[in-house]
Amino acid sequence: MKRRRNPAALLVLPGVVYLVIAFVAVVALLISYSVRVERTSVLFAPVDLTTWSTALGDSYLWSTVGTTLRLGLIVSLITVVIAYPLAWCVQTMKRGWAAAAMLFVVFSPILVSVVVRSYGWQLLLRTGGPFGDTFDSWLYHEPGVILALVHVELPFAVFPILSSIRTIPAEYTEAAADLGASAAQRFRKVLLPLTAPGLLSALQLVFTLTISAFATPALLGGGRVTVLAQTIYQNIQLLAWPLAAVQAVILLVLTLIVLSLFAAVTRLIGGGVR
């Protein structure tokens, strides 16, 4: 008996092959440049781990890595805390046009360039700006970078959380209420466990986007807040390609580690929910 071909798999196959080839080619190029010391466009060059040993022993690099991870963690937590009630409000709106308007407001930042949004926050936080009298000390410091990044990443947190909330039948919370559960108990024992995969997906997405962010930390950090993506760009400008490649590989490894941890936790929670 012949096995039927899955048409969906055939449709997805060209895109998957393209992405895999592009990813493997880029990673191979980065690794090739990271194990050399000279600046050259030749793909294959004598292997030299001097750049790696110099980079791994650089305290400034690890300080930058720490700043990048700290910003990623703080922005992810703040964004998810804001996104969860926002997604729940959208879900509970009775009028379709009101929910659509709310979603448009939430997702409207995606329609504007991240550079334009960052400059907008500069104008808002600068001395004499609308928020300058209260938050002028935030500009060119971590609080200003965090505020702008939360605004940038908020739509990416709302969507997975909203999708997770929409999978929960309304009868679940109604049954819990009939059994005498308070609003806090319904949230803690019913809603939160069932929406945990969506929360983790939002955290994973926001964290990944934050640690790779470049424009917002560069414009709102003012040189005082340096993340790994900035140092990679600066070394490319200085034509220090091997060092930039090493830093890019470190950023890629950190991202893959975080994705793996989130995937493991998601599988663990998913098994517990079943």
Image: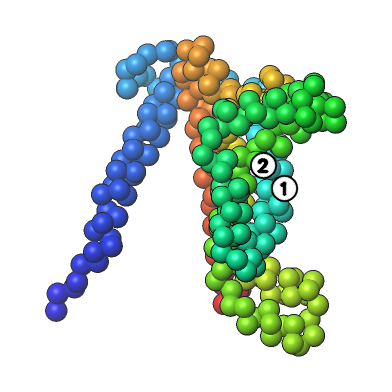
Taking the image as shown, residue 164 lies to the left or right of residue 124, namely: left
Give percent across and percent down for residue 55: 58, 23
> Residue sitting at 76 percent across and 88 percent down?
179
Image quarter of residue 64: top right
Mark drawn on residue 150:
2
> Residue sitting at 61 percent across and 59 percent down?
98
Q: Residues within 10 Å of mark 1 (few under 14, many from 20)?
A: some
Residue type indicated by callout 1: Ile
Q: Nearer the viewer, residue 52 or 198?
A: 198
Element assignment for label 1: helix
Q: Is residue 69 visible?
A: no
Mark drawn on residue 259:
none
Taking the image as shown, residue 184 lies to the left or right of residue 122, namely: right
Element assignment for label 2: helix
> Residue sitting at 81 percent across and 77 percent down?
182
Residue type indicated by callout 2: Val
| Mark 1 lies on residue | 78
Taking the image as shown, residue 230 lies to the left or right of residue 1, namely: right
Identify the image's colour scheme: rainbow, by chain, secondary structure or one colour.
Answer: rainbow
For the C terminus, give its image quadrant: bottom right
